[in-house]
Image (cartoon, helix red, strand yellow):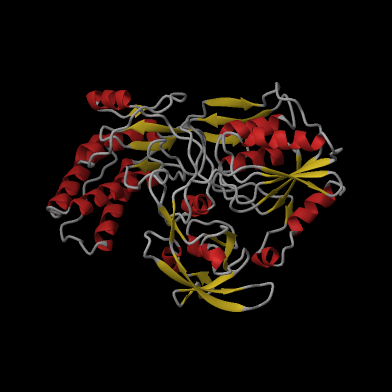
Amino acid sequence: MNTAEPLAPTSYRPHRGKLAAGALRRRRVTTWGVAATVSCLLAASGVAAYAGDAHSTSSITAAAKAGACIEQPEDVQPGGLPPATPATLATLHQAYNCILDNAYAGSETDTRVMLRDAFQSITQELMRRDLDQPTASIANLTGHRDQDWASFAKAYQQVIAGLPGNTAAQQAVASAAVAGMLSALGDDHAHWDDGSIPDPGATTVYTYGFVPVPSGRMTASITDAAPPLYILKVRPGEPADKAGLKPGDIIIGVNDLPTVSNGLINGGVLTPLTAGSATDTVRLTVQRPATGKTSTVELHAVGVTTPLIPTVSVTLLPGGIAEVTIPAFTPTAGDEALAGIANLRQTTQLHGVIFNVRGNGGGRDEPVTQLISSLVHNKLLSKNCDIHNNCTDNHTDDAIPLLNLPITLITDATCASACEDFTADIKFLNLGKVIGQRTAGVVSGTQRGFALTNNTILVMPTQHRIWANGELVDTIGVPVDYQIPYTAQDISKAIDPGLDKARTLLGS
């Protein structure tokens, strides 16, 4: 799914943010799934992955000479990156070896499964384009790395030969092949930054000005998430706002098709919800829970060129409680949160802090560690481990002054990646009660970028993360202490039971 609003600028160091992106070409994942569902929500909210893995012209030149992908230095800021060139069979071979040699589960991945999945993706792409071929099949996969590649290469060349002069189809097939290889890792953070999506910071992004989400937990397929589909956010001054749509409005029809069929979200209605050009329109039928009123509006896309940088807000609630809302773990999120709390303390005696991370899809490690270190010292937070359980410990930064305030945390099913780090630390270290919904279960260890010779980047976690007592979060999520979902009805009626519970727990 394409994003509905422009992405924020990225910094380019490794992270575990939901969308990995290059600083010069900030690209986005565009397929549905757990990660993409959250990615769509984040980007539509003006949130991007605040990371990346620096690549430079010199390192890519080195990769070309060596014939191997080059891991990008963690702290090197990007140099000039030439435009991506067409992917060839040699590019795919390089990607194949790069995945096996560097990804977290690469060395343990069965090449039969990996190349079967790659060819399955190819055939699906051919069928999608009505270009299926009678000889498009693969054989003789044995589990032997080089022999399996030879079998795949033969089958791939036959497919490409059947697409003479169709450059677009050839490149789509190549992208499908790499996506299939990566899918065999079972890692929701791995993707190929192949240069196919333009930089939203340099081009116009078209939008209807709203963020749609399902009411239930994020699942492997958006169609498995619980209906209804509703509007989480409306951008001021944009088409949805001008048409009178409001957060909490339930979308019951898109272009006169129902959003729910047989109790499930109708996946076919999702694509029209995002705009791709200035001529795009969409007809929405919505129901407002607060009034029960149903209406139909037609939205015309507008172009937006200014990326949004989500910022932390700190609000004083009755009873001396600070609500700290963190929409994304940007590089400055920790500083913003702590500065906001300090400002309130200049005029108010605070009795507690509520951290609100609903809708936060991740970002950087550093602000997470910074905020947790303001709550507790001398603690092991988590471990980054390779496939052979060689681990590196992550500890609190005890140079950061403690707040010495009781806290609660409000989270939800769209809290992913670095947001789940934050939630997991608070939950598993017993720093405060967690309220809302189980988090998305979309988290990994540190992502790194690997340059290929055609100026593209494979982004893959080289480690996975476990928490201090061995807890696992990826695919599982972080459980809450009080299950209080924030529903479309709540939003529409301007009530917030989760926030009320958080205040009660702090004695407010």
Q: Of residues 6 and 158, which is closer to you in this image?
A: 6
Is residue 416 placed above or below 254 in the rendered structure? above
Is residue 143 placed above or below 228 in the rendered structure? above
- Residue 371, given in percent of the width and then of the height, sits at 68, 33
- Residue 368, given in percent of the width and then of the height, sits at 63, 35
Taking the spot 79% from the left edge, 54% from the top edge, the residue there is 501
- Residue 416, given in percent of the width and then of the height, sits at 57, 46
For the N terminus, the image quarter is bottom left
Is residue 323 placed above or below 265 in the rendered structure? above
Taking the spot 70% from the left edge, 27% from the top edge, the residue there is 379
Instruction: Say whether residue 468 is visible.
Output: no
Number of marks drawn? 0
Taking the spot 61% from the left edge, 39% from the top edge, the residue there is 421
Q: Of residues 461 and 342, which is closer to you in this image?
A: 342
Residue 201: quarter of image: top left
- Residue 2, given in percent of the width and then of the height, sits at 42, 55
Q: Is residue 217 left or right of residue 199?
A: right
Instruction: Say whether residue 442 is visible.
Output: yes
